[in-house]
Amino acid sequence: MTIECKGQESGHLTTLGSHGRDWIRGMTNWPQLSHAYGSAEDIPALLARIASEPESGLWNDLWSALCHQGSVYSASFAALPWLADMAENQDRGQAVNALGLAGAIMAGTEQPHGAGDVRTEHSAEIAILLASVNRHLRTATDRAEYVDLLESMLGFEGVAGWSEDLAWGLGNEEYEVSCPGCETNLFIVLGERGFFCTSEDYALSDDTLETRPLRATTPSNLEGIGSRLHNIALTDGQHEVAHVLTYVFGDATCPDCETDFSVADRVIAG
């Protein structure tokens, strides 16, 4: 049996496959699970509404319950079968929303959540999500959507750090880090304002802003995750993203104490 819900806005049929049926059939004991606001007994109704009403507000409600400010809960992982099915949706918006939330949930697997060994238990769903995110990466035209999908891919793969930090910096064109020398809070600026490091609020500053230019690494010198992300972006035709990544995995100088440091190392250090 397949269960179909017709999306009111897209007109597409949402087909819930074998992984997504459990929550409808009642095989998941949702009242025994928890989310950000307490018992997860309300989650099945919310999932059913999203399947039939693809509205951003409902997705926001689901994010708030299952991945509140990056925190995850037992109900977060119980929703992975439904999210995996939604990631196969014909409606790209629904699929991308599902991939974004599922990626954020998987990025939180090391947190205390009481859901056990989720990567083993949900290996089938993770495989589906990873295959889907790679398909959508190849066809993404919006830069913001692309970097979000790239981060979700890292979440499904279990890449620590970047599965939570990549999209924030690339999407907002800045990272906030601390200097390893003097511990001053610094802005690493990446984008339209330029590529520089400053300890001042550059968005409100005038021409007297004290900065130090970032030093991009050459693609041939990229290693590890930096090299891989750069190559993926180039393969996908995302040349701007690839260019910014050479600065993310490059070096900076603190304008306050002149300490040189690796941007990527400070981003991962938090």
Image (cartoon, helix red, strand yellow):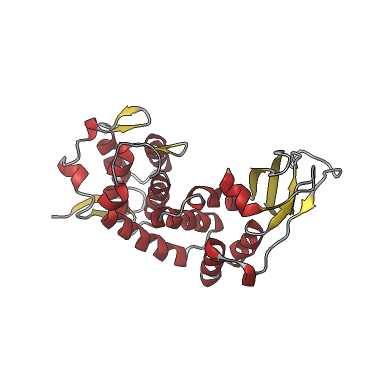
* 217 sits to left or right of 4: right
Image quarter for residue 47? top left
* Residue 154 placement (x, y as % from top left): 45, 56
Residue 245 at x, y percent in the picture: 61, 60
Q: Across the whole image, how many numbered discs are drawn on residues?
A: 0
**Could you say which quadrant of the image residue 251 lies in?**
bottom right
Q: Quadrant of the C terminus?
A: top right
Q: Position of residue 70 (x, y in %)?
A: 45, 39
Of all residues, the one furthest to the top in this rendering is: 38
| Residue sitting farthest toward the left | 1
Residue 76 showing in the rendered view: yes
Q: Is residue 155 above or below residue 243?
A: above
Position of the N terminus, as image quadrant, is bottom left
Q: Is residue 161 left or right of residue 245?
A: left
Tell me residue 249's x, y (percent).
63, 59
Q: Nearer the viewer, residue 116 or 53?
A: 116
Which is more toward the observer, 145 or 198? 198
Furthest residue toward right: 208
Q: Quadrant of residue 181?
A: top right
104 with respect to 174 (left or right): left
Horizontally, residue 257 falls left or right of residue 57, namely right
